[in-house]
């Protein structure tokens, strides 16, 4: 970039994805930076040997008003998912397990939005299945996508066929501004 007739290199110093977690006023504080540059006042300045100049700059403070999620149409199984997510549930290791040996049910939310805030949906399991342990992992990517995966260890307490029932997952789609069915 050329400023006052002098060429400068320009670079993005920071980039952040922000997700509001509660309704009401919010403030994004100014971002301050202090930097040194070599001025192009002699032929060696292209190699970084120019006269150093230190300066400070600051962005503007931004005030926001965060809207609450609508109560109208909010499903009972709303899990905290705000965005556009695909949901998959998979049982690891096949479909036959010995009594009293845990097996893993993985439930994964993946898409655009902050998956980190999603809570595990209610699982109405049959009485002969016991939840032994639950772990979760979440990750946000620079492109705005994220995932959250729940690993639920289940223990069969009786021999025989068991069906894990389907479960509902309510979400809010900010682009549609509603809870899709």
Image (cartoon, rainbow, N blue to C red):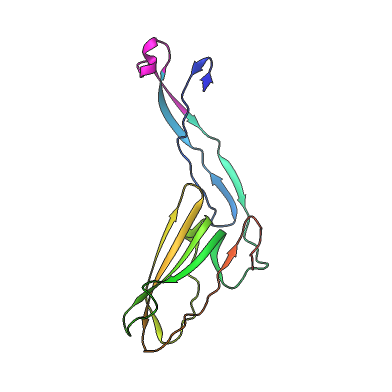
Closest to the observer, 48 or 63: 48
Magenta segment, which residues?
Answer: 39-56
Looking at the rendered image, the quarter that the C terminus falls into is: bottom right
Image coordinates for residue 108, horizontal then vertical, percent: 46, 65
Residue 98 belongs to the span the image colors magenta? no
Question: Is 143 located above or below residue 177 in the figure?
Answer: above
The percent coordinates of residue 18 (x first, y second) are 52, 49
Q: Choose between 91 and 15: the one closer to the eye.
A: 91
* Residue 135 % position (x, y): 38, 67
Q: Residue pushed farthest bottom?
A: 159
Quadrant in the picture for residue 24: bottom right
Q: Position of residue 16 (x, y in %)?
A: 48, 44
- Looking at the rendering, which quadrant does residue 51 occupy? top left
Residue sitting at 46 percent across and 50 percent down?
A: 141
User: Residue at position x 42%, y 67% from top?
Assistant: 150
In the image, what residue occupies the spot 62% across and 61% down?
69
Q: Residue furthest right?
A: 72
């Amino acid at each position: 970039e050329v400023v006052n007739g002098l060429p400068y290199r320009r670079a993005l110093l920071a980039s952040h994805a922000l997700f509001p977690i509660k309704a009401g006023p919010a403030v994004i504080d100014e971002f301050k930076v202090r930097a040194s540059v070599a001025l192009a006042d002699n032929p060696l300045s292209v190699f970084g040997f120019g006269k150093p100049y230190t300066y400070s700059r600051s962005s503007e403070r931004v005030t926001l008003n965060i809207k609450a999620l609508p109560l109208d149409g909010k499903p009972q199984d709303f899990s905290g998912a705000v965005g556009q997510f695909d949901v998959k549930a998979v049982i690891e290791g096949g479909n036959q397990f010995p009594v009293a040996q845990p097996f893993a049910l993985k439930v994964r939310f993946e898409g655009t939005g902050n998956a980190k805030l999603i809570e595990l949906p209610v699982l109405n399991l049959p009485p002969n299945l016991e939840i032994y342990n639950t772990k979760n992992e979440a990750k946000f990517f620079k492109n705005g996508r994220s995932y959250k995966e729940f690993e639920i260890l289940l223990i069969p307490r009786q021999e025989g066929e068991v069906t894990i029932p389907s479960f509902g997952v309510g979400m809010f789609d900010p682009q549609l501004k509603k809870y899709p069915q």
